[in-house]
Amino acid sequence: MNRVVGTGMAVQHRGRLPLGCDALPLVGGTLMQARRIAILVSCVVMLLSAGSVAAQGKPKLPLGLDADSAFVPADNPMTPERIALGKKFFWDTRWSSSGTVACVSCHRPEHGWSDPRQFSITFAGKPTPRHSPTIENRLFSDRQLWTGLRPSLEEQALRDSNRTDEMVVKHLGSVPAYQAEFRRVFGTELHPDGVAKAIASYVRTIVSGNSPYDRFRAGEKSALSPAAQRGQVLFAGRARCVACHAGFNFTDEGYRNIGVGMDKADPDLGRYTVTKDEADKGAFKTPTLRDVARRGPYMHDGSEKTLADVVAFYDRGGVKNPWLSQDIKPLGLNREEQTDLVAFLHALTGEIDPEVGQPPVLPQ
């Protein structure tokens, strides 16, 4: 799978013309010259068309986000038609094996696209083993889930444990309106791969930016309260948050053991269950901090109820264990400093296009 930065198109080699345009014969003759001119005109049209599509494919993002860091697979361009279809699939419980659970069941728009429950409920009515992570700003990530188990949003939508290929086709494929729309978008009968691609395209539109922090950086000095400004200094300094929560999306997309749950008799070993690498025991993906104030409880097991609890956990230096990350050490923050740090985290609350979170009208 190719990574295409900022667009849904395959990237052409710079400095080269499209296939067949870089081998034009340099010979005389009126007929040959006419043919050569025609080919050159055709090549120019091809290049202009490609540039136009690329410009359309580059996502328009709110303040603070980096369009050049977008991850869009070459075989799944973000077209309005795919996004609209994917939104319906995302909200439709008929996507699941039992017809009772939809993607939105565990990723609530009003709760930072996460789950207010400590553990979500599967199609079988059982709790999930981990807290549902947010799906905001997944546009900027390839690997998904707390452990990086899925290499892309497409794979996550295709391999989710709440659905099977057979039931997706049976439930969604039996809806005439879905079949008709699917043919318009993909040119085939409804199939699981296309359903997953459509859902992934929609999820990539769930982007949050233009937070008080972003506006402060853009020059609006009143956007951050004095407490949030002090918290920002701590975030980048003594609290060492930027060691993991780096960049415009406040995550390095890495995996670390910070000690959560490692004091249990049978701890969740996280990334290790994917890689079988001893160093990955108890390590989980660093989540984005954008909109973090909207989506408690926190951590992969939902064990911390509030942001104040999270900051206090880090201030203690996590939970000691043989695989604890070297980035995790006691911070020695006083109560006021911890409060300031929480104020800064609240300042990362941004804006998402309201239309993205509006429930679609589902076909019957």
Image (tube, helix red, strand yellow):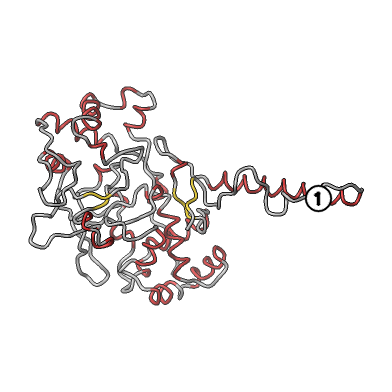
On the image, which quarter does residue 165 sit in? bottom left
Quadrant containing the C terminus is bottom left
Side of 309 where 62 appears, left or right: right
Residue 87, percent from left and from top: 42, 58
The residue sitting at the right extreme is 30
Residue 118, percent from left and from top: 18, 56
Side of 76 where 345 appears, left or right: left
Question: In this figure, which residue is indicated by the disc labeled 1?
Answer: 25
| Image point (72%, 54%), residue name | 20
> Count the marks: how many?
1
Amino acid type of disc 1?
Pro
In the image, 242 versus 287, the foreground residue is 242
Residue 48, percent from left and from top: 67, 45
Residue 143, percent from left and from top: 36, 55
| Image point (45%, 56%), residue name | 201
Side of 216 where 71 appears, left or right: right
| Image point (68%, 54%), residue name | 19
Badge 1 local density, few (<14 within 10 Å), some, or many (20+)?
few
Dot 1: what SS? loop
On the image, which quarter does residue 275 sit in? bottom left
In the image, 85 versus 160, the foreground residue is 160
